[in-house]
Image (cartoon, helix red, strand yellow):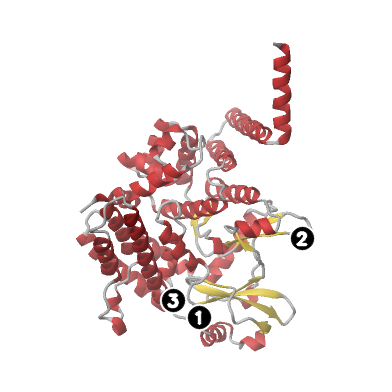
Amino acid sequence: MRAETLEGLSVSLYLTCIIHLSLQAMVSIIYRPSVTALITYDYLTSLRSVPYGSEEYNFLKSQVHLRSAERLRKLCCVNRGTFIKVGQHLGALDYLLPEEYTRTLKVLHNQAPQSTRQEIEQVIREDLGKEIKELFVSFEYTPLGAASLAQVHKAVLQDGRTVAVKIQHPKVQAQSSKDILLIEVLLLVVKQIFPDFEFMWLVEEAKKNLPLELDFLHEGRNAEKVADMFKNFDFLKVPRIYWELSSSRVLLMEFMEGGQVNDRAYMERNGIDVNEISRNLGKLYSEMIFVNGFVHCDPHPGNVLVKKCPASGKAHIILLDHGLYQVLSESFRMDYCRLWQALIKADMKRVQKYSRRLGAGDMYPLFACVVTARSWEAVNRGIDKSPVSASEDMEIRSNTAAYLPQITQLLNNVPRQMLLLLKTNDLLRGIELALNTRASASSFLNMSRCCIRAVSRYQRSKSHSLYRKAQISLTEALSLWQISLYELFLWLKGSQLGNWVIALLRRRHHSMY
């Protein structure tokens, strides 16, 4: 079998072994052929007799990718809940998966299957003890958005407040444990057939995180915590929670609207600076990850909105869906900080050291590539030295299929905290890719600042000497000043004023000689 065919098959196996639920488990369609078998058969037969690398081959490969992605999308929609969440994540892997997959699966971010009117009324009645007409002056039954676990409706309370009502799909809680059990069984079968594929960590994470996401009171507490944590960020808006009309399956929030964070056309129409949004989003997540260790782990475009404030003219980032957060331990956070510092400086000895401390072992080069989504050559050169090129992007996609067994082994070895961070990184890169701001200098400068502050704070907390604490603070201040100076240099270099100064200096230099 040709290498290219194996590559396509490997990608399909990677996708399907994560999200494939055996349709035979559903009695009503027990005799329907397996989605996995269909996808595998399609790859094996469609490309068999076509010359490798020809136009016809590339066209047929694209068609197979598209058919396979559509089968997976339908599978997610049929099974809903847990499967929608996995499909959403896959739809954000623009830099990694074939474009046919990501384009097809992206619709799951805001076009997930919806609950019926009767199901909505049932949940409201059971949880709040009243009918919808008793609670609201008006209630829009067409949801603003439907996600994997719930959907959101716009409504007006009796006192005139406009609110967003998040209502859990009624069958999700009962079905979720069965979904996880079935995925666990499937992955055990996959493990027997393909010993190199280690995906049991998916089940472990689902068992831990899904119950938290299904408790909307927990989500409300997270929302209030993050709003207080970042109250000094005037660009960040988190909807206020109305506790008197909230339960574990119903969450009432302040109504906020805007365009999705990956909608560049919306930003241009509304006079919103795309680079400012990308910079502020990077600043927010750098603070979460490196400084606070409390990380919103589901920043898909449906959960991050942008809107220009008419009064101030400032662009706001609206952060929604606070069900899934990762709390990072201090030791993990410090190792991760130092790893990124080493990656930005291209200090390969420290990259190896902190990759090993984070569980990568001898696979530290692969780990560095997975964390940064850059090639090993770019990591060695310095990831801030140049943006991702088309050839590097193609290299990453090609190598993913070749290294799938190693990637699955790596993911099985790293701390569980790393898994949600990798997912978060994937989603943020997908946004940067859509906005065409990926790997900008400002994102690395923000990360550097946060890493310096976090490490300095940690060092001061461990020091009992006032002299040593002062020394740490001075070093921190100098390092931050150097970054600010470099940022000023970059701004001057790219501004009209900077170009004018450079031109003036050149004319003066020529006149002297």
**The disc labelled 1 sits on which kind of residue?**
Ser
Residue at 64% in and 69% down: 241
Residue corresponding to mark 1: 115
Question: Can you tell which of label 1 and label 2 is closer to the viewer?
Answer: 2
Q: Which residue is mark 2?
A: 310
Q: Amino acid at mark 2?
A: Pro
Q: Nearer the viewer, mark 2 or mark 3?
A: 2
Residue 250 location (% of width, % of height): 56, 76
Is residue 283 shown left or right of residue 68?
right
Circle 3: residue type? Gln
Q: Quadrant of residue 376?
A: top left
Query: Dot 3 lies on which element?
Result: helix
Comparing 66 with 56, the one in front is 56
Q: CA distance from mark 2 to mark 3?
A: 41 Å
Density class for disc 3 (Cα within 10 Å; few <14, some 14-19, many ≥20) is some
Callout 2 crowding tier (Cα within 10 Å): few <14, some 14–19, many ≥20: few
The residue nearer to you, when weighing 194 against 180, is: 194
Q: Nearer the viewer, residue 436 or 510?
A: 510
N-term-proximal mark, 2 vs 3: 3
The C terminus is located in which quarter? top right
Residue 185 in sight here: no
Q: Residue at x 67, y 74 (%)?
A: 163
* Residue matched to label 3: 173
Q: Mark 3 vs mark 1: which is more N-terminal?
A: 1
Q: Return the x and y of residue 494 as percentages of the image width and height.
A: 66, 36
Alpha carbons under labels 1 and 2: distance apart? 35 Å
